[in-house]
Image (spheres, helix red, strand yellow):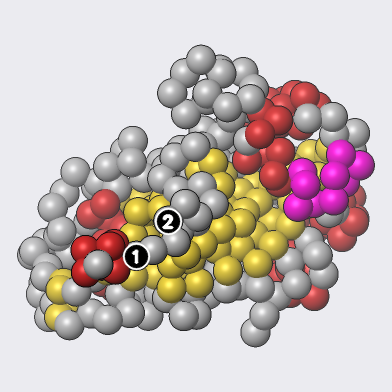
Amino acid sequence: MKSKGTLIPIGGNENKGTRTNEKFHTEKIEKGILSRLVIESGGVNALIVVIPTASSIPVQVSESYLEAFGKLGCRNIRIADIRSREDSEKQENIDLITKADCVMFSGGNQSEIINKIKDTSIHTILMDRYHNSSLVIAGTSAGAMCMSEEMITGGRHKEAFVKGAVGMSKGMGFLQKLIIDSHFIRRGRFGRLAEAVAKFPEMVGIGLAEDTGLVIKECNTVEIVGTGMVIIFDPGELEHNTEKYVKKGELMSVTNLKTHILAQGDIFNIEKHQVKILHVETPLKDIHSS
């Protein structure tokens, strides 16, 4: 099923225009991910609703997004302060989500989003509007990871490729064919995403670096945005996968797991498992054979 809405998962620590001299913050905010989010949502007059549910400091997080979007000239930013499942049934929050052009989930703990929003009225409205309207659903870090049908809840990222090192549960279900992980490069999360893909080999694993994200349209076309890299684990042609056969705590083996390293402007087609590189028209194999 193709959806009319747009998803923008972000790997965390996106440029908010406050630390432009640090690594991953070299671009001005006007050229960054949040600017693209505003464009996709309809411009500076769009109603952007921030949901800080995942954060342990929701007030501070909300203020940081009010400031960041304000720097981009946005005039209509609201906060849906959802701290319980009861808050997901409040009419004032339902009205915000019903009217929003964009809903932005903050970082923190993705399980908090699931516990307080999944299978509530707000979740139902989000799912319906994502499939049937031009709604943009964005999320950073935990807010990105919760988008998947199968969601990573945690994992010992320093472990080798060991069965049971990653925790999984059901996510919000906006993405049926992708598993998202965030802060991927900085926190060395290769092993846990690889195990997630081995556990669900019908899904593609996406590892997002910080200040890096995806613009996903029609549940199919993935465009990379931001200053870092995206690592894709594509299990579409796996030859061996021992995940089902080894015991918890034992090492696993996977062969022919395709890996792509993509940057801003590159495209990945989920349905066709095809990559289009922005700056290189000729594949490397063709260069070597010429």
The picture quadrant where one finds residue 198 is: bottom left
**Front-most of residues 288 and 235:** 288
Residue 143 vs 268, above or below: the answer is above
Position of residue 168 in the picture relative to residue 126 (left or right):
left
Q: Amino acid at mark 2?
A: Val
Task: Tell me, yes or no, whether the two marked residues, 1 and 2, touch with CB atoms within 8 Å.
Answer: yes
127 over 184 or under it: above or below: below
Q: Residues within 10 Å of mark 1 (few under 14, many from 20)?
A: few
Q: Quadrant of residue 150?
A: bottom left
Q: Is label 2 in a helix, a strand or a loop? A: loop
Where disc 1 sits, the SS reads: loop
Residue at 66% x, 73% y is 218
The span picked out in magenta is 38-46
The location of residue 234, given as percent across then percent down, is: 34, 70
Residue 216 lies left or right of residue 111; in this view the side is right
Q: Position of residue 188 (x, y in %)?
A: 27, 42
> Observer-nearest residue: 267 or 110?
267
Residue at left 65%, top 51%? 138
Q: Is residue 74 left or right of residue 269?
A: right
Q: Horizontal and vertical percent for residue 40?
A: 76, 52
Which residue appears at 13% of the width and 53% of the height?
A: 160
Disc 1 residue type (three-letter): Pro
Residue located farthest toward the top when viewing the structure as drawn = 21
Q: Quarter-wise, where is residue 284 in the image?
A: bottom left
Does the segment drawn in magenta span residue 41? yes
Query: Disc 1 and disc 2: Cα gap in Å?
Result: 7 Å
Residue identifier under label 1: 283
